[in-house]
Image (spheres, grey):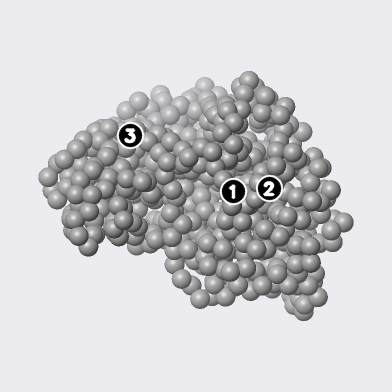
Amino acid sequence: MGRTVIPELVRTPVTGVRLTDGLFRTAFENNIGFLKSLSQDAILYWFRVKAGLPAPGQPYRGHFEDNIKGQTAGLFLMGAGNSLRWQEDAELRARVNEIVDTIDTAREPDGFFEPIPKAEFGTKEYPNYVRVWLNYGLTAAHLSGNPKALGLMRDMQSWFNRCDERFLAKELLLGFQGVIANTTVYFSEVGLPEDLDVTVECYQENWWLAQLIRNDHGAIYRRPTPHGTELEAITAYLDLYIATGKPLYLNAVNSAYRMFQEKWQHVGGGIVAIEYTEITPGCLWLDPIHKYNELCCSAHWLYLNQRYHRLYPDVESYVGEIEKTLYNIIIANQAGTEHIRYHAYLDIQKDDDRSTPVSCCAGLGTRILGSLPEFLYSLAPDGVYVDLYASSELRCTCGGAPVTLATETDQPLGGAVAIRVGVASPTTFTLHLRIPAWATGEVGIAVNSQQVAVGQPGTYCTLTREWRDGDTVSFTLPLGIRVTRYTGLDQVPGRNRYALEYGPVLLGIVGPFNWRGRFTSLKVDPEKPEEWLEPVPGQPGHFTVKGYPRHRVVPYYEIAEERFTCFPALGA
């Protein structure tokens, strides 16, 4: 098993969390519905062909299975396997087991199991993208209880560690992705030192690390094919820091993080950097004529921030980034049980391309949606960090005793939170309660209706005490409207554009484009939104616009087919 030099101060739960109500619960269930809509015969087609088994039907057509065969099996395994960690589902479990069994049947004696001839492995994205997808999927299948998944991943990695193609993998399309394929195995229960050695030998790009350390923006946008999924490689370099303790990795990752955040991140959390589009620093495209806010890029941003959170759990901003990404990209790109969108466009109309249900963004989308419970809490030696507030139940151990935390809340559009403690006998531990930076003021925290602490926005408030069964922590997070001026290249001549946020949620304005039929323009004071935004009774986070009866302001994640903008022009 891979060893670490740098300790992570909190652990991400892999089981023991149950969603009980609310937006996260709905998104989790929708994801299961989406997974069940996928064709098992299409997913298994190429593996069955390789194994000499009957292969009814057809594979999914298009780039993601015609050119990179096998990725859709990884997509399903990472979505279904992660879902099964938290909630049993007989159909998902049977399908996960069948996919793993079929991969095992297609496995060659030396461990190679991708559904292609070995001669094709050193082409396209097979050593990198497909290997990453299948490693993600097999890891999730293992966590859900499949007994074969880790052995398959180990055998394939051992084959890769010996193959000649490992030396050219980083030169292939999106070769930087492969670095995380190796670290995923290294940090698993079957990781070996040789996995780390091959990562450094065959994937480490010293010239790129040097560019990042110099804060050279060209490291982000001047590659032959620049891409926001380079965040996946950056996450792997943070893993290399954890594994080795070498400062060069941390210095490079810290610099990359700052550059992405300052020059390529939209209000609401989306990442603008993407392949085959001009992504000069600060471009911040809005018009969908430019591709931007790819779900994959935000998914890697989310996992990068999760790694940071485990290293520095008291830095609230890392969980703040996870929160924005979940609400404004991952859930916003989920079209019920039918589809997961590729891009999170913020202007004119949401992404309506449904040419394939099994894109890379659908893969990472279903992985995260199936993993939603793991982002709510973190487990620490002294107790529990409550990171995101969603109606849920956590079962864990604190101080050697079983503990249950039952959270009830109307987040993200309401601020009320109540956490009920369940213990068999009085137990001492610490609750670390996140007070989000978006809170508009300090937060009074009560235990059993008696105020015991005051939390400041952008911090964790700690409560250490002997907890008794039924103790209830309660508080209200104050929400308000934040207005941010747009600085990118899609300006409205003579007007200023602004984004609106309510707590962690990006808002969109639905209604006619009343400025030359191209933009939404409101003659209102952007500095005083409380004067012209009128809350809709009984619908938190929904507003009408004073003087503009045909426009309404709603959470971006609720927008489906309507024409809208998240960046109206505001001012006289």
Classify mark 1: helix, strand or loop: loop
Q: Is residue 288 visible?
A: no
Q: CA distance from mark 1 to mark 3?
A: 32 Å
Q: Which comes before the other along the chain, label 1 or label 2?
A: 1
**204 or 323: which is nearer to us?**
204
Q: Is residue 425 above or below residue 265?
A: below
In the picture of the structure, the residue carrying the numbered disc 2 is 195
- Residue, far right: 119
**Residue 495 in picture, x, y percent from top left:** 49, 24
Q: Amino acid at mark 3?
A: Thr
Q: Is residue 525 left or right of residue 190?
A: left
Q: Is residue 66 visible?
A: yes
Q: Is residue 250 above or below residue 370?
A: above
Q: Amino acid at mark 1?
A: Gly
Q: CA distance from mark 3 to mark 2?
A: 38 Å
In the picture of the structure, the residue carrying the numbered disc 1 is 2
The reply to whether discs 1 and 2 touch (Cβ–Cβ < 8 Å) is yes
Q: Quadrant of residue 94?
A: bottom right
Task: Decide: few, some or many residues near mark 2? Use Cα within 10 Å; few <14, some 14-19, many ≥20.
Answer: many
**Residue 462 in picture, x, y percent from top left:** 27, 39
Q: Which comes before the other along the chain, label 3 or label 2?
A: 2
The residue located at (33%, 41%) in the rendering is 434
In the picture of the structure, the residue carrying the numbered disc 3 is 459
Q: Which comes before the other along the chain, label 1 or label 3?
A: 1
